[in-house]
Image: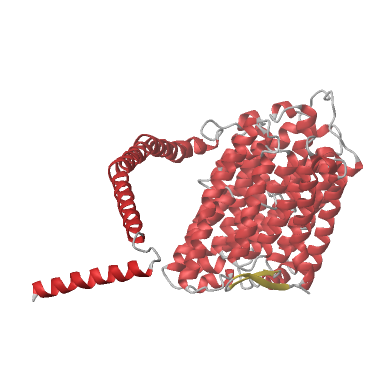
Amino acid sequence: MSAPLWLLPALPLAGGAVLLLTGHRADRAAPTAGAVLAVATCALATVAARAGADATAPFLPGLPARLSVDGLSAPLAVTVAAVAALVLLAGRAGLGPSGSPARFTGLMLIFTGAMLTTVTAATLPVLLTGWEVMGATSWALIGHGWRDREATGAATTAFLTTRGCDLGLYVAAGAGLAGGAASLALDDLARTDEPWRSVAAAGVILAALGKSAQLPFSFWLSGAMRGPAPVSALLHSATMVAAGAYLLLRTGPLLAATGWGAELTAWAGAATALVLGLVAVAQRDLKQLLAASTCAQLGFMVLAAGAGATTGGTLQLLAHAAAKSLLFLLSGAWLSAYGTRLLPGLAGAARLPRALGPLFTTGALCLAGLPPLALWAAKDVLLAAALTRDPWLYATGLAGAALAAVYSTKALWYVWRPAPPPATAPPARPALLAPLTLLALACAALTPLALPPLRTALERTLDSGGRPAPHLGEAALSGGLALAAAAWAWSRGGPRLDLPAPFTDWLGLERAARALVVRPVLAAARLAAAFDTRVLERATDTVAHGALALARSTDRLAERGLADGVNALAAAVRRAGTGARRPQTGQLHQYLAQAVAAFTALAVVFVLVR
């Protein structure tokens, strides 16, 4: 039953490659073809998840390629494929970029295939392959409008930041080999010897924090909002940023085995949920608010990975994927209609057309963690595990959950303000409303998964049984706190929730990165270039000129003299040869006379010597 598993990443990868190679000739058919392929991929993911397949093929000497759909990867694979299908359907209905639809759709499919490879990878080399392709295509998707220099600059910043952190995975692979994990299976990394186990854990944590835009690498997600709305809806909900959290959930045993990795991961996630929650509250740009909230919500998943709450982290990932892709798609629709992303400019956006307002409200209330929507129930599951580890960790997570209610309510307050109707209303066609409605329904439909008995069944599937379950009082506390925070935020109004710098500019993290990393690296590069030009190049030229002069002198003094000597010797030999031929006349009497003369001479010499 391995065929559907191989086809799962291969179908979108092959379809995307064909669209890219076809180019503009496929522009007209690309949106429909992409949506059909994505729906087929979603069906394959469902089949593979039900079968629980495992597949192996030769890859590198001693390192086979292994794909596996187990309890953790199955729901993730279905979520990735489903969100990709709904986003491409929404793009086909008018939310996609206007330029080069074949290139855009092809890249979206390749990106989806790479994420599915990452999710189903059972070994580190296969995961790295999907990870690399995902990083490269994310750069091309964020910078899809390549004539926009700010978009290409943001794409480069995102690529270099995540790429630098990705080096941690290569370090982890080397440590795994050195520590005895010969096949580099992800499950074997926890069984490697020290100190290689700690080195591998450090590499995995670095790569995951960078990919998931956690502190201190959160800034790249702010610039990535320059990409088209479907790119934000796919990359920053179920894929790309979710890949880092998934990697930490997958390697939970490795983090726990180090004795320090789990605690570090949990606190990194909790700090991001709290601090980036404040950054989200400070934003006056809807997409920036959603971007900062993405970092904060991913912080809960990272916290779950550190706290050993695999079930809570998985539920958080699924619910966040539905809510955030819905909100990004709607923000793209309003951006194209209103021509602004600023919240004051979007006043009244939820009122016209009426169909979009309730959908945005559903996504925002889910993001706020209000009961009975999915993110409320998911947070309780992971916070219950945090409470057993450290009450301060639980309190920090609870504060981050309250902030989620504040920034979500801030967005709702603006878009529901009374305002004159816009000159151009955003599209509300059935083809667009269908995928958006499905995402909104998922925000509520996923809640039972976090409650018994479905949660118990999910824990058995994830093989994470025995984790603490949230008590009724904890659920009531988190739900009541979210309701109170939302009511307080609504009563204060959007403008009074604005926070000063440095929260408005993402804590100045990008400036700090430029000051601490980019500028020193560029200065070192310029110094190396100057040393190369002024020292190494000149030294090389001097040595070359000296060698050339020596060669000319050698040619003039030695080689020419040697040639003259050889020529003189040749002339002497030639003359000797000419002289030697003279006695050879062919006359017998002359040979007899020469012999007599020679013997006579020898006799005289013999007599004289004797």
Q: Which part of the image, by quadrant, shows the C terminus?
A: bottom left
* Residue 52 left/right relative to 531: right
Q: Position of residue 270 (x, y in %)?
A: 54, 52
Q: Quadrant of residue 351?
A: top right
**Closer to the camera in the image, 2 or 187:** 2
**Residue lying at the far right of the rendered structure:** 430
* Residue 141 left/right relative to 280: right
Q: Quadrant of residue 30?
A: top right
Asked which colour scheme the image uses, the reply is: secondary structure
**Residue lying at the far front of the rendered structure:** 589
Q: Position of residue 182 (x, y in %)?
A: 53, 74
Query: Which residue is pictured at 46% across the width and 70% down the height?
Result: 178
Q: Would residue 443 be seen by someone viewing this image from the given angle?
A: no
Q: Position of residue 434 (x, y in %)?
A: 87, 47
Measured along the vertical axis of the image, is residue 549 above or below residue 313?
above
Q: Position of residue 302 (x, y in %)?
A: 58, 56
Query: Which residue is pictured at 64% across the width and 41% down the height?
Result: 291
